Image (cartoon, rainbow, N blue to C red):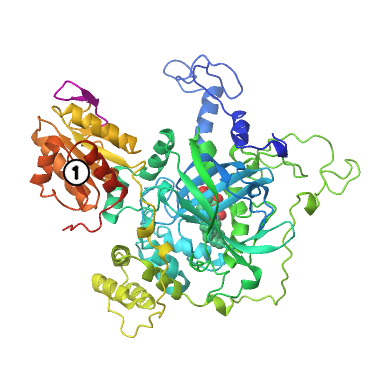
Amino acid sequence: MHEQENVNEKSKQDQLKNFKVDDSKKELTTNQGLKMSEDELSLTAGERGPTLMEDFHFREKVTHFDHERIPERVVHARGTAAHGVFETYESMEKYTKAKFLSKAGKKTPVFTRFSTVVGFRGSADTVRDVRGFATKFFTEEGNYDLVANNMPVFFIQDGIKFPDIVHALKPEPHNEVPQASGAHDTFWDFVANNQESAHQVMWLMSPRAIPRSYRMMEAFGINTFRFVNKEGVAHFVKFHWKPKLGVHSLVWDEAQKIAGKDPDYNRRDLYDAIEMGNFPEYELGVQIIEEKDEFAFDFDILDPTKLWPEEDVPVTIIGKLTLNRNVDNFFSETEQVAFHPGHVVPGIDFSNDPLLQGRLFSYTDTQLLRLGGPNFHEIPINRPVVQFYNNQREGFHRQTINKGKVSYHKNSLADNTPSPVPEDKGGYAHYQEKVDGRKVRQRSESFNDHFSQAKLFWNSMSDREKQHIIDAFSFEVGSVKDITVRQQVVDMFANVDRDLATAVAQNIGATPPENANESTVTKSSKALSQMNTAKTAETRKVGVIINNGFSDKDVVEILHGLNAEGITYEIISEKQGAVTGTNGGSLMVDHTFSTTDPVLYDAIYVVGGSVASNVFHKNTTYYLNEAFKHYKPIGASNDGIRFLEENNLNGSIGVVEGKGPTFIKEFTLAIAEHRHWNRKVV
Ligand code: HDE
């Protein structure tokens, strides 16, 4: 355990070392440390007789197994996580006294868990859903959790409605169908009857809901928090994560196929990138509003269904998160980590956002059930890197051995310790916001506009994103069986945009809205469209289709060239083993056509070879056309070029052919583009 001043970027790893066990090359023992002579046969009365009760080894092994499951998270059950470091760019002392933000260059160990929301723990990664992005900062002042989502707004305005939205979104209770999907009656019935959901639903229907990678998502703290500085001055703040690789998404047909071909797609992507040393990076940004400007906007800054347009309240970048280490054990770390937006440090405080207020209750409560008692903060992954001292004792699975007989406050026997710390010595003191009012179950009228920002979002979309949204609505609402619900949804979204509602209505057999009360907002925000994001080929994955008799020299040069641009690749051929080139060089095959699929690559590069069987031919045609249909870059050299010709793909947008450095350069640019939306796809 570290004393406060010693906390550095390695502190968490040093702490975890004490709990790590390597079982390999060890002798087998029971949990009591007893070496066992046999582990495959239970103790029986005779070789063909019954098992004996006294077989403690059998009992221990099977009992442990019988109890290996804990409840999955009620939401965000499916996830994956990694360790990393957060580095502060510039002191934020002007706004917050949080020590981890107080000095340029300061490094804090972190643990980040990504998740989908609605699916069960074993569900597919690439479903249409919100993604979670929760980070635990192990600071010298205790743990700070930034529990964020990849969309900046939420479905509801008040925590008391969370069980309702989640019940409506989860599989329906009578038959537990469908898994990890909002495309069913109860979800859309909820949407239509809780119109505050309009804005978030627009995001959910957009490409943001099917990210290409956890490494390529923005994330947002959604709720309004407060920064408080040493002088006690507070500012409202919203948190943003901005990925260095830009914000990129899958297309729907691809996402659905990946859910079958590789349900672990996003999890694997994160794990592999970190193993390869391609550490994901995200910058932390803050939007800050002075307290005096609380009412200066045409929305309520406490309303979690509203974002603060970046054009009006700019995002200041204040630091960088780098994920650089995979977990050693998924259960111990990823499954047992327990986040809570109420885990704050001095200098970070809450606002009266009614959703946030609800969250502040829920997270500890849920851990009590999920992790089996009140001592979950002692599980290694959850421990702060500073020691904790208080009078809490006992409870299931208590680990610390607190000495002495005093476990109460105030006392004289222990000199009145552990003693509270005054605010000016680093003790947490809540911001003294003045509140007074009647106890009411009412919401301020300033929360009542549900459509203006939904319209702002729609206005900000490119044509491609708009089409994605229309298609997504058509799929999701088209999957609703109850036609009255379908109609209600169409009528509701006519309040956002009449053309959108009409297009959806036509696709799903509903009546186009007649008397739409369409929002009159004409403003748009550049920050909301993914078309304006960073573009790079770095860390992208190319499927290289190749067969025996390929032209060694050219191909090796190209593969090296792509690698030098930070692009990764996998060799795909007809059979496992090696493929041999015309000059005798060989490449190891990573996948046959059947162990992988074009949907699992960012781009396809066809090399071919002098030997091309029917199977090779058929599969290459499939790979090329599938990649083309999903707007992906395609490259071809040598024998590969004739496959382009055969499929009429040569000369198309995002299709590159040739050799040497020019090809490498053009193909890299095509890959950086992510998708070639201007391509004509039939
Ligand atoms: Fe959560 N949320 N949430 N949520 N949330 C949970 O806590 C809850 C909300 C978010 O990787 C649960 O430990 C309520 C907004 C993430 O372990 C639970 C409300 C945002 C994760 C819970 C919200 C989030 C959770 C389930 C409305 C984005 C996964 C398991 C008042 C800012 C953390 C758990 C991880 C998890 C409650 C709304 C993000 C039940 C009541 C808004 C990323 O406590």
Q: Which residue in the structure is indicated by mark 1? A: 623
Residue at position x 14%, y 38% in the image = 640
Q: Quadrant of the C terminus?
A: bottom left
Residue 597 visible in rendering: yes
Residue 423 coordinates in the image, percent (x, y):
78, 54
Q: Nearer the viewer, residue 579 or 600?
A: 579
417 sits left or right of 194 in the view: right
Residue 276 coordinates in the image, percent (x, y):
40, 33
Q: Over which residues does the magenta segment extend? A: 577-591
Residue at position x 24%, y 37% in the image = 661
Magenta stretch encompasses residue 583: yes
Q: Residues within 10 Å of mark 1 (few under 14, many from 20)?
A: some
Q: Quadrant of the N terminus?
A: top right
Residue 187 visible in rendering: no
**Three-letter code for the amino acid on which mark 1 is drawn:** Tyr
Residue 501 vertical placement versus 421 (above, below): below
Residue at position x 50%, y 42% in the image = 322
